[in-house]
Image (tube, rainbow, N blue to C red):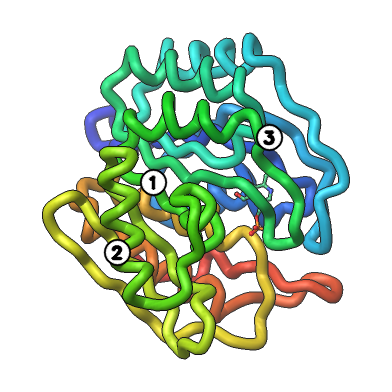
Amino acid sequence: MQEESERIAMPIVLTIAGTDSGGGAGVMADLKTFAALGVHGCVVVSCLTAQNPARVLEVSPCSPEFVEAQLKAVFTELSPKVVKTGMLYDEKIIQRTASFLKKTSVCLVVDPVMISTSGAKLLREEAIEVMKRELFPLATLVTPNLDELASLLGHPILNELELRSGAKEFYELYKCPVLAKGGHLKGSHLALDILWDGIHEYSYSLPFVRDVSTHGTGCTFSAAITAFLACGFTLSEAVGRAKCYVNEAIRGSVRISRYYALDWFRFKK
Ligand code: PLP
């Protein structure tokens, strides 16, 4: 038996997000990522989804009171260093979450989940303004993909130049650092992401992995950033390491039935 003083301390992180009964996205992807990267993951469930890799069939949101009860349960005994939010779905859940997090000093990564790869609505229309107003100002980083960035800016992003200027425009609008994920830019062999922290621009590009259609990559990316931040890396380092992690997970995708799942455990730290 190890002595108490000999045991290594593990950083604690928290995800506030929806479930995925298919095991590919949401809190399931987050927890696998946290485990693979050596941090202890706590979970506050915002909503349940009946889902498989092909589609989201039903969403059942938790009550805002129950979301708050889970937050209280976590923060009473544990001290997450970094928190990430994923699918929050409804305006009241976002309001409760934001007003709770305001009273803490956590570092917050917001994945502004709006629509799934399969086309399902994961954020109610009425919740979009609340997310912008209440959650973005608390964020250390917001991680929109191309469609989310376009929707949050109110115009399309069609090329690399617009991705770079879109990141700066996002910062000016919402006053928080942003990782603009350009993985789905047309005609590019590279998956390019731009981090703009208000002072510096960082570019990250890796070859786009073709021929595997996985889901949960966005959740996995933001969860990996969360884990690396909790391990003490700077924002730009955490994003770079997280991108390598996701790239490895996609490249190592495994076949499950007629679909693919990320290989969360392939990455060697
Ligand atoms: N389901 C849940 C619960 C999610 O949190 C997300 C993304 O964050 C998705 C589905 C969508 O994942 P994808 O767009 O990769 O299918």
Give the left or right position of residue 240, taking residue 120 as reference.
Answer: left
Mark 1 or 3, which is nearer the eye?
3
- Ranked by sequence position, the earlier of labels 1 and 3 is 3
Between marks 3 and 2 in the image, the one whose residue lies nearer the viewer: 2
Q: Residue at x 22, y 60 (%)?
A: 237
Residue at 24% in and 57% down: 196
Q: Which mark is residue 259?
A: none
Which type of secondary structure does the marked residue at label 2 adopt?
helix
The mark closer to the camera, 1 or 2, is 2
Residue receiving disc 2 = 165
User: Residue 27: x and y, percent?
Assistant: 61, 42
Tag 1 residue: 142
Q: Amino acid at mark 1?
A: Val
Mark 1 and mark 3 residues within 8 Å of each other at the beta carbon: no
Q: Nearer the viewer, residue 155 or 7?
A: 155
The quarter of the picture where residue 176 lies is top left
In which quadrant of the rendered image does the N terminus lie?
top left
- In three-dimensional space, the C-alpha distance between marks 1 and 3, rounded to whole angstroms, equals 18 Å
Residue at (30% x, 73% y) in the render: 204
The disc at residue 124 is 3
Comparing 231 with 67, the one in front is 67
Query: Residue 257's spot in the image, x, y percent?
Result: 85, 72
| Disc 1 secondary structure class | strand
